[in-house]
């Protein structure tokens, strides 16, 4: 009986968030039947939430190693400011400009990784410090104002990075699908991904079994920052105005998605599919709240409360996972002892 209850509890924990996403969608569909369960609303959700989803997946990578990158919001802002600045003030192609922005944010990730692993600075403090520097750079580049494109506008190929549609879906949805696929392959099936999880759960054990901890953590920060740089390019294509302060508002939803994602699919550990489900819940909830006509403060309130719930659920899932592992080890030892006594 106990094992049945334990199995049911495990299933609920594993698939609770996907079920909750469906429940929330049905709830808002019943309240707003004319506007919410429509193809146009679905396209709007996918288009508006593609950048937050990419950032949540980027934030998840260092979290796998038990590190946090608080500079990613400012990296996003700097990346999109750099793209807008060079699009307006240079003759370079937009492809080269986006490459420069992605390389620049990757360097930021490298610096974060070096500060955390070699300078031994806590990831919260190190990335908060670099984030402040990045915010200052964004303000310096823009002069504290906004970068407005010329009358003829930006290149069509660049704006299509976010405005294009394929098979009836916004192009942003395909970026998310591609990134989730890559992260699932790397984290779940490749030795590097398994090494990252070992580092996150027990850094000392990782070093003892020969996993290059410092290299993997640094690469995790670099990969996260590169994705953030790409998201900054997409943000520039979407907003088409350079705003030095826009990146910070994306930080909270990114961490909500990454932390809440660790409470589903793979209980107790950050994972790409769980993060995708968590982002879907945030997107569905925020869209419904906005269509109900809630005040502007309702969205950050929803995100903040969800973050608190995510941290609590993540801690609970991790403790239950450890308890389950300890219980399995105890039963195995008892079975081994019984077999030895019978012999």
Image (tube, helix red, strand yellow):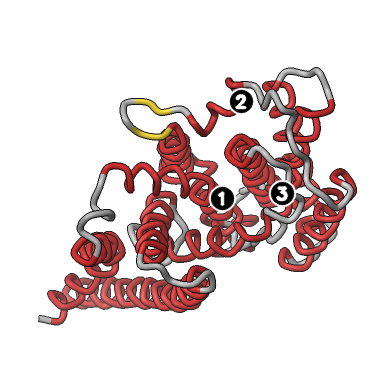
> Could you say whether the residue bearing mark 3 is in a helix, strand or loop?
helix
For the residues carrying marks 2 and 3, which lies nearer the camera in this image?
A: 2
Q: How far apart are marks 3 and 1 (CA)?
A: 12 Å
Please name the residue shown 31% across and 64% down the image.
17
Determine which quarter of the picture holds residue 260: bottom left
Residue indicated by mark 1: 55
Q: Where residue 131 sits: x, y (%)? A: 78, 58
Closest to the observer, 27 or 115: 27
Q: Mark 2 points at which residue?
A: 158
Q: In whole angstroms, how far apart are the C-alphas of marks 2 and 3?
A: 18 Å
Residue 41 placement, left or right of 282: left
Q: Distance between the residues labelled 1 and 2?
A: 20 Å
Residue pushed farthest front? 151
In the image, residue 3 above or below residue 62: below
Dot placed on the residue nearer the N-terminal end, 3 or 1: 1
Residue at the (46%, 49%) spot, across then down: 49
Split into 4 quadrants, where in the image is the N terminus? Answer: bottom left
**Do residues under tags 2 and 3 come within 8 Å of each other at their CB atoms?**
no
Q: What element carries label 1?
A: helix
> What percent of the width, then of the height, locates residue 23?
22, 65
User: Where does residue 315 sit, x and y in percent of width and height?
Assistant: 46, 76
Considering the image in quadrants, where does the C terminus appear?
Answer: bottom left
Q: Nearer the viewer, residue 343 or 275?
A: 275
Label 3 belongs to which residue? 77
Of callouts 1 and 2, the N-terminal one:
1
Q: Between tags 3 and 1, which lies in front?
A: 3
Q: How crowded is mark 2: few (under 14 residues within 10 Å), some or many (20 or more)?
A: many
Checking the image for residue 333, the label placed there is none
Residue 261 in the image: above or below residue 12: above
Q: Quadrant of residue 165?
A: top left
Label 2 residue SS:
helix
């Amino acid at each position: 009986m106990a094992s049945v209850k334990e199995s049911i509890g495990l299933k609920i924990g594993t698939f609770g968030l996907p079920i909750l996403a469906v429940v929330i969608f049905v709830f808002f569909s019943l309240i707003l039947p004319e506007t919410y369960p429509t193809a146009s609303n679905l396209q709007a959700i996918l288009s508006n939430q593609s950048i937050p989803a990419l950032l949540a997946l980027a934030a998840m990578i260092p979290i796998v190693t038990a590190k946090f990158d608080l500079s990613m919001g400012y990296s996003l802002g700097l990346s999109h400011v750099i793209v807008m600045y060079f699009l307006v003030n240079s003759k370079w192609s937009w492809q080269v400009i986006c490459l420069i922005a992605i390389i620049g944010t990757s360097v930021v990730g490298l610096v974060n990784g070096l500060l955390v692993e070699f300078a031994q600075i806590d990831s919260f403090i190190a990335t908060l410090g670099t984030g402040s520097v990045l915010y200052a750079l964004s303000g310096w580049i823009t002069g504290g104002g906004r970068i407005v494109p010329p009358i003829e506008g930006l290149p069509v190929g660049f704006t299509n990075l976010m405005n294009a549609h394929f098979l009836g879906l916004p192009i942003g949805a395909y970026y998310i699908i591609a990134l989730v696929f890559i992260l699932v392959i790397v984290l779940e099936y490749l030795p590097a991904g398994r090494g990252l999880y070992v580092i996150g759960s027990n850094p000392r054990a990782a070093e003892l079994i020969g996993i290059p901890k410092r290299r993997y953590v640094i690469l995790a920060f670099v990969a996260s920052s590169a994705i953030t740089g790409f998201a900054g390019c997409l943000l520039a294509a979407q907003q088409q105005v350079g705003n030095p302060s826009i990146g910070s508002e994306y930080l909270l939803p990114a961490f909500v998605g990454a932390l809440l994602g660790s409470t589903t699919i793979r209980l107790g550990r950050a994972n790409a599919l769980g993060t995708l489900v968590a982002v879907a819940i945030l997107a569905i909830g925020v869209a419904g709240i906005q269509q109900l006509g809630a005040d502007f403060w309702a969205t950050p309130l929803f995100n903040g409360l969800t973050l608190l719930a995510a941290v609590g659920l993540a801690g609970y899932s991790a403790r239950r996972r450890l308890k389950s592992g300890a219980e399995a080890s105890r039963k195995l030892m008892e079975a081994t002892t019984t077999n030895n006594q019978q012999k």
